[in-house]
Amino acid sequence: MHLRRAGILAGAVALLCATPAGAKTCDEPAADWSRAAPADAGMDAAKLQEALDYGTSELGFAVRVYRRGCLVGEDRAAAVNRGTQFESWSMAKSVTSLVFGRAMTLGLISPDDPVGALVTEADRAHGAITARDLLTMTSGLRWNGFRDYDIAMPDRLKDALTVGIAHPPGEYYEYSQSGPALLAEAVQRAVGEDFQAFAQRELLTPLGIEPGTWRWVRDSKGHTQGFFGVQMTPDDYGRLGELLRRGGVWKGRRLLSTRYVREAVAPSPTNGCYGWLIWVNAAKPCIGPRITERPVTDSRDFPDLPADLYRFSGLFGQLVTVFPSQDLVVVRTGQDKGLVFAGGAGWEHDLYAKVLASITDQRIEPPGDAPAVGGVVDRPNADKGFQDALLEPQEYAKPWLDEPLPPAGPERARAVRLRLAHPKVSRKRIVTARLTCPARAPRACRGTATLERAKGAKRYAAAPGRTILVRFRLRHRPKAPVSLVLGAVNEDATGGTPSRISVTIRR
């Protein structure tokens, strides 16, 4: 507890130290956002107004700009649209990620959990997909646009469990709709209650987003549509971005773990522009949603904009964009002139550029060439886009057929939760780790745990919900802090469910 409080305090101190002297900062919003004049927030009022007007001129319905927790600019129709709930489209994927992050922070789910350990009706192939695969769009599910984008299909969970698998999970990025819906169902099974009820109590209510002020569409079977269908006000969308900007801490309470926040906005191995259902600008290549082809570009999404920006992005230009180094959150809802907006449009870049140009207390330099992620596979795929998908009526008819699920696969173990009990190695070179068996695991956790540079694997056994200590002896005492891999394999009939985290050991 003391370490957690110290971490939150250290983050707050770092935030204050990074803020220019005299700049206005605001606490987390209560019922309404605190306001700051642009000049008090280190922004030029005329240039900011130009950016806001530009945002609405490009078919924007609502535009908001927040800096250091303060509302500093809004579109001219804000008094009218303030209470309007706008459709998220694919921004809902990022909201699904946040709800997963809250469950992960509470120790209820792990990115290493296989689908089959939670959605037990999944067959062998679908059951092997992990939550991380779903978060990074590497589930391997076969793409057919007319099937994947059919928002009227009656049972999205059944679709996710019956669509073919075209690539080994974890290896190939393919933007998907049924993948995030399957993740929402996995979270629901892991927390033991309705996905939206959990989201309301554990995430939205703490942020000040009250019941009745938002909604999330379900399919006709009652499953939350984890890929679209959130309807929320612009200022409440802003709260979601602000939570991430604040590192997952809200009013002194950690809602999202540091690990979740770090990994959610980091580029994944298979797409330099994608994290955990959140678009990023950190690396290359960028792989976008398939429309007429699967687009791959050898650059950042926005080569001249800050490398650490990340965003929720939805069809027709729905955006929640965070610029961490500038303490900035931008929200935009509306339409797009092209009607098939999938992110990275010219007007989107120009909106960001105009907002950034209004900042007066910070010089913003282009980030330079992007680092490349190492796991991108760009092999030929017979399905080039919607033009080919149209020729496969047998694919997009399947969700409407009353066919049973394939036989369920073997029982799979949950992933155990790993963390250090203490970051320092003892005088006898002992490192102690905590291992937790998930509370909703179907049976006791048994297996082996390992620590890089330690002697031998350690057997463990823990009842559901129990935490045990596992001690490792390092071969050599480190002379300086060192990052090591802590891992475990929880045994089952398929060979076991692995868990791995990187830990830093100090002398």
Image: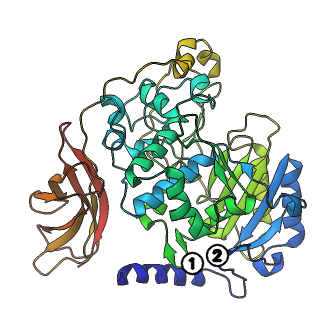
For the residue pair 379 and 122, the one nearer the viewer reads as 122
Residue 507 found in image quarter: bottom left
Number of marks in the rendered image: 2
- Give the vertical position of 360 relative to 80 (above or below): below
Residue 288 found in image quarter: top right
Q: Amino acid at mark 1?
A: Lys
Q: Which numbered disc flags the more N-terminal residue, 1 or 2? A: 2
| Quadrant including the N terminus | bottom left
- The structure residue drawn at horizontal position 60% and vertical position 58%, both measured from the top left corner, is 307
Q: Is residue 9 left or right of residue 449?
A: right
- The structure residue drawn at horizontal position 53% and vertical position 23%, both measured from the top left corner, is 399
Residue 164 appears at what percent x and percent y? 43, 23
Which residue has dot 1 on it? 251
- Give the vertical position of 382 relative to 48 (above or below): above
> Taking the image as drawn, is residue 265 in sight?
no
Which residue has dot 2 on it? 28
Circle 2 packing at 10 Å, graded few (<14), some (14-19), many (20+), is many
Give the CA separation, mark 1 to mark 2.
7 Å
Q: Amino acid at mark 2?
A: Glu
Residue 352 appears at what percent x and percent y? 75, 57
**Mark 1 vs 2: CB contact within 8 A:** yes
> Taking the image as drawn, is residue 367 in sight?
yes
Q: Is residue 257 left or right of residue 312?
A: left
